[in-house]
Amino acid sequence: MTARDDSPDLFEAPPFEQNPDAGDAPEGTGAPAKPRARKTIRTVKPLSEAETKRAGAAKKDEKKRKVTPEERMKKMGLVSDWDFALHMPLRYEDETRIVKIRDLVPGYWALIEAVPYSTNQRQTSKGAIVIVHVKDDTGTLPLVFFNFHRSNILPHGKTLRISGEVRLDMNGAPQMIHPRYALMKPGDALPTTLTPVYPVSEGLQQRTIRKRIDTALLDVDMDDPVPEDITVRFGLPGFAESVRFLHHPPAGADLTALQDRTDPHWRRLKFDELMAQQITLRETRLLQKERKAEALVPEAGSTIEDDFLKELPFELTGAQKRVVDEIRRDLFREHPMNRLVQGDVGSGKTVVAALAALRAVASGRQAVLMAPTEILAEQHFRKIIDWLTPLGLQIAWLTGKQKGSEKKAALEAIASGAAQIAVGTHALIQEGVKFAKLGLAIVDEQHRFGVAQRLALRRREDFGATPHLLMLSATPIPRTLAMSYLADLDVSVIDELPPGRQPITTKLFVLDKKPLIVSSILGHVAAGHQAYWVCPLIEESEALDLTPAVDCARQLAEALPDVRVGLMHSQLAPDEKHRIMEAFAEGEIDLLVSTTVIEVGVDVPNATLMVIEHAERFGLAQLHQLRGRVGRGSTQSTCLLLYDPNLSDTGRQRMRVIRQTTDGFEIAREDLKIRGPGEFLGERQSGMPMLRFADLEADAVLVETARDAAQEFVRRDPDGARRHARRWFEADAEFLGA
């Protein structure tokens, strides 16, 4: 499923492809390796306008009254001794040894002993700048202070201990900016442990949180429920030892291993966290198995599934047949199926869902198929109608926008059981929708629904027995992520494309060549094909210098007067969106300019060109989804990514990956590396808490180790295992049954 671009046409490779590793540090410089940057695990959502106003008002209130350190720490989620004990340092400062000035390394924190010998002051529009020069027996170093008062100038001729990060000035010479300093006193001893630097909120000082954490370490119960022989087997230190070590590493500890979290004591915390997560998932699965469901066994003489397969104009792929068998085995059981079907765009998930729905109908039960958008729901509805009404089935259609008699008729058909299958949006699981005998719920693009919808399905009392749940996703989930966050699900993979489908060719093009792309569309349309043009914005933005979709559509229409140009974006009314997509599907629009609203949309086999403007602004998964809008027929399709040449490192990485492969699983793995699980899944899509310490990419081996250890722990000591899990994830207990 991998397609590379080797053709010598106008779609040129980006300059950075010629030297993808440019910028790496040269070897042999003598500088220690810098610690790897850690990905942020938790996702921070942007505030709404109302939330921004409330935050602003709260900040004003804070200024009016003195906010206590306890209040600030509580805002950070630091309340119990356990919270403080697991509030780990971001980095460490080594005050256990003195570094000579000649040995200072830019980019690193250091402690020196030096004597001030000269002071210069310069006035700027922003205030005074004071530069103090200090020396030891190996060299000199400038200390820079902004807005510094002359009365506080360092005393000349006195030996000081000075600490700070070593930086380079405009001329490449080392300096320290706003370092800490203290006058040397006779008998002053150096600390015996590294100094921790903790994450803090504005207004909270390091010494305050250090003191509170040290108190917690004395009071907290760090009794270790994990059997010692398990941790010894994997070469891991004790839990209490690890926590205390990470807060106060001894002099001589491997600073690089501490910073990049490969130290054995870090491994112990990661192991415990991952094991607690696996135990929690195991407990969740057991709860699910306690729920009752109707076994979906076809009634005697039912041939509806075979009839459907006979009428299909194509043969199922081997992967589709395998997944259908897995689903049928689940539906035969008396506890609810909880299965995720992953398949790349165009792999044929809808026909698999249709066969699952037919198994419910053949068993005398109803099935419901939900999609996150009305456009996608309608695409499913049309397919289901075409496939299943010839078999004598009644299909109901229900969305949130329906009114009057149409909605009433749909609700009555669903409630009476006259409609064997219902298709629509999440409106299908809202209050007021009653099913006669629901046996199976199918959710497409499941990552857009999340835990709340899963809970809604399972908590509806009118269902009687819990319905079986089948989830579909065109966003492949990497194995380590599935093991950590989706282990409560059974996962099936459709890893074949239907015969006749050709891999999509992806090419990169710098933005200043856009006119050349525009002119090429005329020939594309003249050949009888259609195209998409995707823009990242709808309207003008002062923050981003990007051409909005509205302007782009107008410009393209002016440049291509013989091409029928349409415009689609999220601000249009649902009826208008539907009309435009219908016109495009019917061939009445040649070029559809759109925002990402078409990320999940209708299949248009004649659309064989996808142009994405400012591709660097999109995530990998989103680019892959958009690319999947073409290549729906047997004709070779092309995806063209227009990018700003001034790319960030992340942008370069995204462009390289999306150009080199069409394999959704490979793209998902790379996307996980870039974004982390919080953004990949969505804050609560998994139903599980985000990890604080473990990194699914860097700690992939540890994930498997923790899973095996969790199984053994539960078998040997179920109560101890449960206590261990609750210690880590008590706050997220409400989602564990999702």
Image (tube, rainbow, N blue to C red):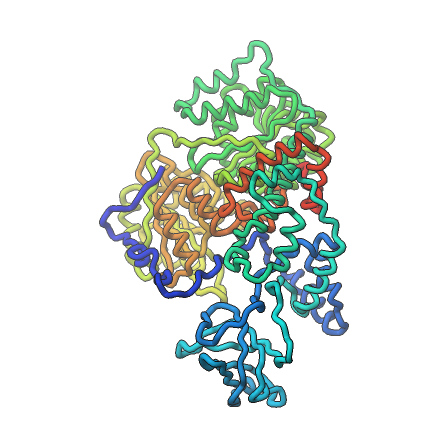
Q: Quadrant of residue 613?
A: bottom left
Q: Is residue 11 above or below residue 578?
A: below
- The image quadrant where one finds the N terminus is top left
Furthest-left residue in this view: 8
- Residue at figure coordinates x 36%, y 39% from the top left: 631
512 relative position to 141: left or right: left
Q: Is residue 337 visible?
A: yes
Front-lying residue, 618 or 313: 618
Question: Above or below — where is 395 with respect to 32?
Answer: above
Viewed as shown, does residue 48 lie left or right of 306? right
Task: Give above or below for 181 relative to 442.
Answer: below
Q: Position of residue 695 (x, y in %)?
A: 53, 48
Could you say where residue 572 lies in the image, as x and y percent from the top left?
52, 51
Compared to residue 335, the image places residue 507 above or below, namely below
Picture coordinates of residue 245 (x, y %)? 62, 55
Residue sticking out furthest to the top: 301
Q: From the viewer's perspective, tell me whether residue 602 is left or right of residue 3.
A: right
Whether residue 197 appears in this view of the structure is no
Q: Residue at x 58, y 10 (%)?
A: 300
